Image (cartoon, rainbow, N blue to C red):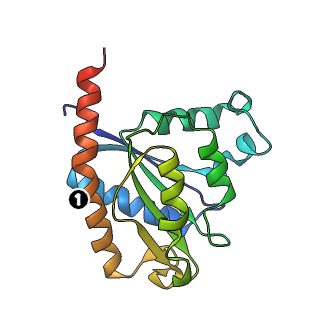
Amino acid sequence: MSRPLNVVAVVGTLRSPSKTTALAELILATLAAQTETESRIIELHTLGPDLAGTAEREELGVKAQEALHAVEAADLVIAASPVFQGSYSGLFKHFFDFVGPYALAAKPVVLAATGGSDRHALVVEHALRPLFAFLQAWTAPAGIYLSAGDFDGTTILNPEVYERIEMAVADVVPVAVALAGLRQTVAP
């Protein structure tokens, strides 16, 4: 592939600073250590006014439209959400409701979540993975979940997290690079 991998992280957090954003940043840094990337983080709380109360994509504000286009054009998406009541944030779901029906088909996605305790650890498998399966995305086999005990503020302390991220990145980079190269070859 002759160009950097276009990576977009969508973070469903409702404020900043955020543990979920810190996790997404660590995933992006790990990706950048493996392959050349151009990356961007979209924190959905910054799009709240553009998303709130909107039922149709055409009604979205400019910032939300631009964010959707960035996700749809990405070679690789990192989907990260804090856990609320055992699932991803409502704003996260609302954003992905506007993604084109086939825009993520076969697109590599790394799933990540943060929650208050380990009892939310299955959110990746029981909430995020089904959402992205519906969108026909290719999700990395290793999902990443961190609980509050893995952090000091927004600093990630648990060394096992780094291993999990390395595993997810090792799974997804070859797929993302191959698919991006294929799209580049087929594009006019």
Q: Is residue 170 left or right of residue 164?
A: left
Q: What residue type is disc 1 on?
A: Ala
Q: Residue furthest top?
A: 188
Q: Is residue 88 left or right of residue 40?
A: right
Quarter-wise, where is residue 186 in the image?
Answer: top left
In the picture, which quadrant includes the N terminus? top left
Residue 80 seen anywhere in this rendered image of the structure: no
In the displayed structure, 100 sits above or below 131; it is above
Residue 53 seen anywhere in this rendered image of the structure: yes
> What residue is rendered at 55% in x and 63% in y?
127
Q: Residue 87: x, y in percent?
A: 61, 66
> What residue is rendered at 71% in x and 48% in y?
48
Q: Is residue 167 left or right of residue 80?
A: left
> What residue is rendered at 36% in x and 60% in y?
27
Residue tagged by mark 1? 170
Q: Residue 7: x, y in percent?
A: 38, 44
Q: Residue 64: x, y in percent?
A: 63, 38
Q: Nearer the viewer, residue 85 or 2?
A: 85
Q: Residues within 10 Å of mark 1 (few under 14, many from 20)?
A: some
**How many numbered dots are placed on residues in this image?**
1
Q: Nearer the viewer, residue 95 or 17?
A: 95
> What residue is rendered at 41% in x and 38% in y?
74
Q: Nearer the viewer, residue 173 or 45?
A: 173
In the displayed structure, 164 sits above or below 68; it is below
In the displayed structure, 20 sits above or below 8; it is below
Under circle 1, the secondary element is helix
Q: Residue 124: x, y in percent?
A: 48, 66
In the picture, which quadrant includes the C terminus? top left
